[in-house]
Amino acid sequence: MTWKELCVPLLLSLLQPCTQSLKPYDLLYDNGIEAYYKNEYQKVVDYMEGSLHSYHQLRLTKIRCRLGCKERYPMELKPRFWGLSFFSVMLSRAACVTKCEEGSLGTLSVHRVSEDIKSEFYRRIPYNFLQRAYFKLNQLDKAADAAHTFFMANPEHMEVQQNMKDYKISSNTQLVDREQCSHIEEYYAGVKLYDTEQYRLAIERFEEALKQYYQADAECRAMCAGPHKFDEYEYVEYSASLYEAIADHYIQILACEHECVRELSTRPGRLSPIENFLPLHYDFLQFSYYRVGEHVKALECAKSYLLFHPGDRDVSENVSFYESLLPEYMDPGDIKPRNEAMQFVSRHILESEVLQSAAAGLGFSYHEPDFWITGGDRQDENRNPSGTQSELTDVTGLLSGRKAVQKIDRQLREGGPLLYQGVKLVFNSAHLNGTQRVQLDNVISEEECRELRNVANMITLAGDGYRGKTSPHTPNEKFEGATVLKALMFGNDGFIPMKSARMFYDVSEKARRIVQSYFMLNSTLYFSYSHLVCRTALQGQQDNRNDLSHPIHADNCLLDPEANECWKEAPAYTYRDYSALLYLNGDFDGGEFVFTEMDAKTVTSSVKPRCGRLVGFSSGGENPHGVTAVTSGQRCAVALWFTLDPTNRELERLQADEVIQMLDQESHGNMNINPRDEL
């Protein structure tokens, strides 16, 4: 019996007792949030720590099972019976993984969670609840670590920045990032040592960083081997042959594995990867080894770097220089790039070829990014130790392959008629220090504001419009909302006066017409989403608040303050073109609307809400915006988003149009009155 045959079953069996009683992390997380709003802070700690433990244990179990089963059943194919031997291995791996995971976790369906919950754990949201709970329990050291962990993925969060300062005053411990990415931490530690010319110590860190990177790559790829949904097909009607079904699923897994390059080079909470991340390890190492006199290793690392950038003239000259330093008895041709680098690049190139071939053959869309560019070179005078200089290699493309927001391709105009008597222009784009911005007053009357607030208090539901999350942007406020269609349904059922529900519909249409006219658009502006929303400050949670009610963002792209870009890609609502907010009141503290620069920090203008005030603007990266904390009272508004593309019209709005048409027909025909409106 071989070593593998002995060790792999042992590895799989060791997993089972570790996680036998593992509870679903999403359930624990929900329980923790519920306890938080009941001010039961010890329960918050217990549930949140439990959810984080389950989250990590679940991931660890999946990785160990998948990698262990892959090693236990290697792909040893027999040429004569290739198909049978291939599927025999696949079936063996499938049975192995199922037995391993179910033996450790129990019923696997219990541990399936929504994409929203996965996103919250990726953004480290549980640590925000934890730091506040630990603070309430006067456990400041733990509060500081939790706050620091959350802050590392949310550096724009002002409240946590202030909290960390307060915790550090009361705590002498070194802050710990409980979710740190070890390969990135080791890399930056190596860079710091390199900058201070401590080359031997830098070498140790860079070598450890490479070891950790390749381990993280294996784990990332293992996590891709789960269920997928093929976006190009409607799965209710999906029908495919054996090979089509296998190809569909495998290509998604392969694309996921291929993207691990970007994932592993992206710091927590950031959108843009570290440029040229993996190749830079070899770039730093080649010069560090040269400085400590290890010329063979310097040559290995330089040749490894050239695998990623074959045309780099500086490093090519370094190779020639290092070869000249070798002893005469050594043949420079015998010094090869490192094996792990050769295997990685070869696999990456082959994956790219397969993906592009599959895209052409199966008819799905795929764009191959440039995963590393020379724009991420070391910026120091030692990059070329031979002393010669060369021009920069011309490499085009983006590391991440993301599509940055393009400039608006239509003619930008404003100053069109406001259409309705009494509506007042307060500030245009110039006064608001931006592009395609407007502030208007007297769009609706005080009476209309009061009636719409009454509607809001009667029909809005906590979490409506926010996937059921009562506090989607901050735990210090409660969000409640309702759509136009919901208001009409409540009116039809007699729960609110139909004229009030109709007012919501009419007011939103009035705002749409004003925005379309003021910005002098040549095509129709359609609703993409309309929402009556109120946010209420929660009592007992307003002391020393420095967070935002709604973080700085753009409405049709993913704002990336570090890169000074806005990426027009999912999950952003890329089809939105204009946005508007019609305020219903001003009797609350805080809650100002702010425009910022793309850095999400520099405020260019702010608007204090009040009844009848409307702010309208184009939805792209030219208009980052947010809302300051509502520290007391309730802030209500009609939030509207519009699109110029009729194919992205809001479905509920179309249904609401039909309801209105029916009501108009009834009123003209029978003059029917809802008897409950008369009560």
Image (cartoon, grey):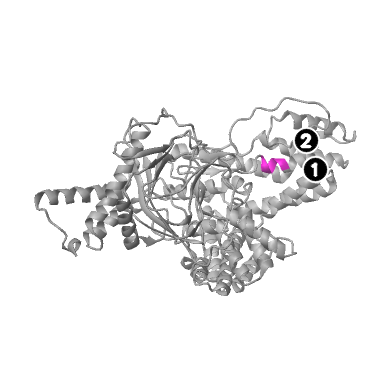
Name the residue rendered at 34%, 58% in the picture.
Answer: 456
Q: Residues within 10 Å of mark 2 (few under 14, many from 20)?
A: few
Given residues 101 and 485, the one toward you in this image is: 485
Seen in the picture, residue 186 relative to 643 is either above or below; the reply is below
Which badge, 2 or 1, is on the more N-terminal residue?
A: 1
Q: Are marks 2 and 1 in contact (CB under 8 Å)?
A: yes
Instruction: Give the residue number, with chain letter if any, for mark 1.
Output: 195
- Expressed as whole percent of the image width and height from the top left, the position of residue 143 reads 64, 65
Residue found at the far left of this picture: 670
- Expressed as whole percent of the image width and height from the top left, the position of residue 73 reads 59, 59
Given residues 498 and 305, the one toward you in this image is: 498
Residue 279 within the segment the image draws in magenta:
yes
What quarter of the picture does the C terminus occupy?
A: bottom left
Name the residue rendered at 36%, 34% in the picture.
Answer: 518
Tag 1 secondary structure: helix
Three-letter amino acid code at the position of disc 2: Asp
Q: Residues within 10 Å of mark 1 (few under 14, many from 20)?
A: few
Residue 384 placement: quadrant:
top right
Given residues 468 and 318, the one toward you in this image is: 468
The span from disc 2 to disc 1 (Cα, nearest Å) is: 9 Å
